[in-house]
Amino acid sequence: MVSTASSSAALPPARTLSVPGQPPLALRVWGAKPRGAVVPLVLHFHGGAFISGDVDSGACLAELLASSGAVVASLAYPLAPAHRFPDAVEAGFAALEWLFKQRTRLAGSGAPLFVAGEEAGGNLAAAVAMMVRDRAHPPLAGQILVAPMLDPCGATPSLRQTMGESTGCKWMDGWQQYLRGPMDAEHPYAVPCRAQRLAGLPPALILTGGDDPMRDEALAYADRLREAGIAVHSGLLPPTTGWPDSLSEQPAGECPCAVEVRGHVRAFFQAATPPPS
């Protein structure tokens, strides 16, 4: 039986693991499996508009997921522009396959596997979920997308509200450095919100805030997943989250939305049916 009975108590110190490869990939692991228990195992992707960030800047969401009852492995994926699409997605898939092989040691026998991410990391989590569906391995129990960066058009009202009269922003700059050219914008692994086929994806938890520039694209993707028959749990948090920027900051104490986020995550872990091993 999968346990998610955890609290916001202090987590054990994070540890670093290495995924074999050329070059090897680094994972920062948060949380630990209680003796005799099975807990969710989550591959987490940090934000940074594809061009910045690391496992330290992604610690806020990683710790929230871990304190919701999971073991969380945060990936130091290759960044653009040195590594453009699809390098980060392929690195994520390789890390997920490695975690699947290590799941008994890290999270217990038959531990359900999830992907998660915020901002650009939410894009990568959604893309890896599609790649898993298309390659039919490893079995994935769910995807958690927080303030996900899904649409390179930059034309949504929520993003325009943030940008004001500016004609550019860090997210648009990130898209330009991540995509190799216009054709990449049509690839579902690069721009999941434009995918023509969404059937067969795992259940999704999509969280956004009232003040989130990516709010509209997140809610639109949730609607499209529902229309494709995917079980979607979504939440619109109050307009005081500061997302996605506040997720990469290191505040003193917990972020104001921590309790609500943990509530959504725990409910999602419990609702997602672990796939067969």
Image: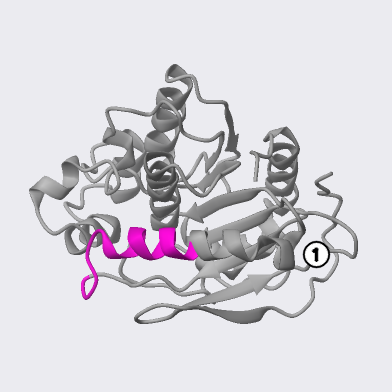
Residue lying at the far left of the rendered structure:
182
Residue shown at 28% from the left, 65% from the top: 87
Q: Is 94 situated left or right of 239 in this image?
A: left
Could you say which quadrant of the image residue 233 lies in?
A: top right
Is residue 48 at least partly visible in the picture? no
Q: Residue at x 40, y 70 (%)?
A: 77
Left or right position of 221 against 63: left
Q: Residue at x 29, y 56 (%)?
A: 171
In percent of width and height, residue 17 lies at 58, 80
Q: Position of residue 94 (x, y in %)?
A: 43, 63
Q: Residues within 10 Å of mark 1 (few under 14, many from 20)?
A: some
Residue range of the region highlighted in magenta in the rendering: 81-95
Q: Is residue 198 visible?
A: yes
From the image, tell me which residue sits under label 1.
33
Secondary structure state at the residue bearing disc 1:
loop
Q: Residue at x 58, y 58 (%)?
A: 100
Q: Main secondary structure of the magenta part?
A: helix
Q: Depth check: give the residue in front, 103 or 223.
A: 103
Count of picture labels: 1
Q: Nearer the viewer, residue 45 or 234?
A: 45
The foreground one among 234 and 244 is: 234
Residue type at numbered disc 1: Lys
